[in-house]
Image: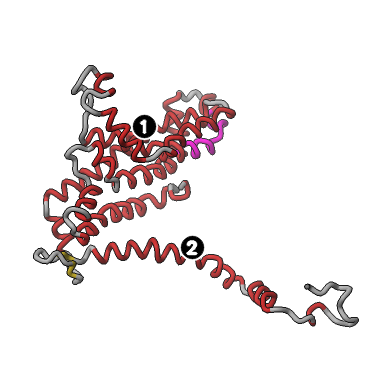
Amino acid sequence: MATSTLDRPPGTAAADIPRGPVRRLSAWLHRHAGVRLAALLAAPLFWLVVAYLGALAVLFVSALWTVNGFTGEVVRQPTLVNFRTIATDEVYRTVALRSVGVAAAVTVIDTLIALPMAFFMAKVARPRYRRWLVVAILTPLWASYLVKAYAWRVLLANGGPVDWLLGGPGSGPGYGLSATVLVLAYLWLPYMILPIYAGLERLPDSLLEASADLGARAGRTFRKVVLPVIVPSVIAGSIFTFSLSLGDYITVQIVGGKTQLIGNLVYANIGAANNLPFAAALATIPVLIMVVYLVAVRRSGALEEL
């Protein structure tokens, strides 16, 4: 029990009362702010270094290994043969370019859809309805990824609802590259709407009113007032849509037909081909592309919008 002021012997100061190890440690930490900060950040930094950066390091190292074609054993000797194969084989170059094209197409489609939706939510809808619109945007994220992907497989099937709406069997896109882009654009659309909505909410209505008072039409107001403000938000959303589409392998397997992207090539080399080093080399392609992309947009203010 701590000693109260009334229980102290006459003439005894508070500093003269013996302190336990916990109080001594607390006093020492109070005097050393740097140690307190290091202790506070030790656990999350350990998790980041070991679980995340460590996993990436293992990925890059294993990409330098090869597989013995006769025994199937992994040869742990550094070599660039996997990367040379990816760079020189036309099939892998085509798949890599196709994957980047799909990710870019998904990002453009989501941007075109998200801009008017986010603008309506932030500037047109009444404030009491905005929270319900945000909930409506977030609701699809609560459903299982596989449930949504297989639902689209049913919709896009030959003779399915999409064919029926477009005029009969064979009228829809069916399974293939177009279906993959369509489904990925649907899956990642909320990740584009929410950053743009947040950016538009910070745009003062007085700027729009001032533009209208000066005679600017809607198109000019959008180009000169709205667009410069939301460009960082659009880039922030594109980081999600582009990266998630670039590494996806489930959607292309469900609705992609014979389409090959980087994701399902990685999956095939891990499973059926049992060539983990080559799969690791393929998996480094999306990582390197995203590193280049993040370096390119770091000065746009997009990273602060995440």
Q: Position of residue 146 (x, y in %)?
A: 34, 40
Left or right, residue 278 beside residue 191: left
Residue extending furthest toward the left? 70
Q: Crowding at label 2, few (<14), some or many (≥20) Cα neighbours within 10 Å?
A: few
The secondary structure that most of the magenta stretch takes on is: helix
The kind of residue on which mark 2 rests is: Pro
Asked if 90 appears above or below 114 in the picture, the reply is below
Residue where numbered disc 2 is placed: 44
Q: Position of residue 262 (x, y in %)?
A: 23, 49
Quadrant in the picture for residue 269: bottom left
Residue 200 is one of the magenta-drawn residues = yes
Residue 75 is one of the magenta-drawn residues = no
Residue extending furthest toward the right? 10
The span from disc 2 to disc 1 (Cα, nearest Å) is 37 Å
Considering depth in this image, is 133 or 303 the residue closer to the camera? 133
User: In the rendered structure, which segment of residues is drawn in magenta?
Assistant: 196-208
Count of numbered labels shown in the rendering: 2
Left or right, residue 190 beside residue 34: left
The kind of secondary structure element at disc 2 is helix
Dot in front, 2 or 1: 2
Residue where numbered disc 1 is placed: 112
Asked if 87 appears above or below 177 in the picture, the reply is below
The kind of residue on which mark 1 rests is: Leu
Residues tagged 2 and 1 counted as in contact (Cβ below 8 A): no
Q: Crowding at label 1, few (<14), some or many (≥20) Cα neighbours within 10 Å?
A: few
Q: Earlier in the sequence, mark 2 or mark 1?
A: 2
Residue plotted at (26% across, 37% down): 180
Q: Position of residue 153 (x, y in %)?
A: 27, 32
Residue plotted at (38% across, 49% down): 297
